Each structure stands twice: as structure tokens, then as C-alpha cells.
Amino acid sequence: MDPDKPDIMISDVVVPTAGRDQGKLFYVIGTDPVYLILANGKDRTLEKPKRKKRKHVQKVLRSETRVAAKLLAGDKVLNSELRRDLAYLSRDMQANNLGG
């Protein structure tokens, strides 16, 4: 693991820094030493997640939402829940960046 990168775990929110998904928010739904399994509920659903190398993503935040708690507990999560949560987080991040 890269010492410069923070440890990324299931239920973290990340942004890919390379590839066609660059700049979009994703939830981490699975991990292994080299790859992360990402889903956003829209382009990358829970049924067809994106496999991305750890070095090609940047951790945005440790989400403390209900969806994150469900992912950590291993409970069933719906694609609509992922979409709604990520849309809310995206709006919140844009508001904070524009506000100062």
C-alpha cells in the first residue's frame, strides 16, 4: 500500500483521478490490496460495479450516512439510495467550495 495515500475502506466516498469516470463521486463497496470496487447507482450499479486501482482514486470523505452504515454492516443497499446520497454529498461539496 502507498504510504502517501490514506487507507480507503468500504463505505468511503472516492473520486477517480484517471479514466472516463474521472471527477465523479463513488461509494467503495468492496476492497482488496490492489483494487477497489466502486458503485454510484447510476452508471455503475451494485450489480455491475467498477473495479479501479487504488492509486487511481482519491478519498473525498468518510461518509457517516445511513447508506454508509448499511454498507459497513453488509445490509442490502439499493442503487437509488446510492444515487440520492451521492447527489446530496455532491451538492454539499459544491456549496462549500463556492461559499468560501
Image: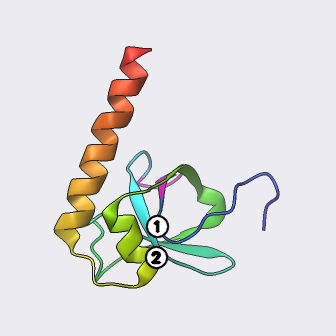
Q: Is residue 65 left or right of residue 72?
A: left
10 or 73, which is in the foreground?
Answer: 73
Residue displayed at 28% across by 84% down = 76
Residue displayed at 30% across by 69% down = 44
Say whether residue 36 is magenta: no
Q: Is residue 75 left or right of residue 41?
A: right
- Residue 42 seen by the camera: no
| Amino acid found under the numbered disc labelled 1 | Ser
Give x and y (percent) for residue 1: 78, 68
Which is nearer the N-term, disc 2 or disc 1? 1
Give x and y (percent) for residue 29: 44, 75
Whether 73 is drawn above or below 20: the answer is: below
Question: Which residue is disc 2 drawn over?
Answer: 72
For the image, the number of numbered tags is: 2
Q: Are marks 2 and 1 in contact (CB under 8 Å)?
A: yes
Question: Which residue is disc 1 drawn over?
Answer: 11
Q: Residue lying farthest left?
A: 80
Give x and y (percent) for residue 39: 36, 68
Looking at the image, is mark 2 or mark 1 nearer the viewer? Answer: 2
Q: Which mark is residue 76?
A: none
Residue displayed at 42% across by 23% down = 97
For label 2, the crowd category at 10 Å Cα-Cα, with few meaning under 14, some 14 to 19 and many 20 or more, is some
Which quadrant would residue 91 be assigned to in this image? top left
For label 1, the crowd category at 10 Å Cα-Cα, with few meaning under 14, some 14 to 19 and many 20 or more, is many
| Amino acid found under the numbered disc labelled 2 | Leu
Residue displayed at 82% across by 57% down = 3
Secondary structure type for disc 2: helix
Residue stretch rendered in magenta on the structure? 13-21
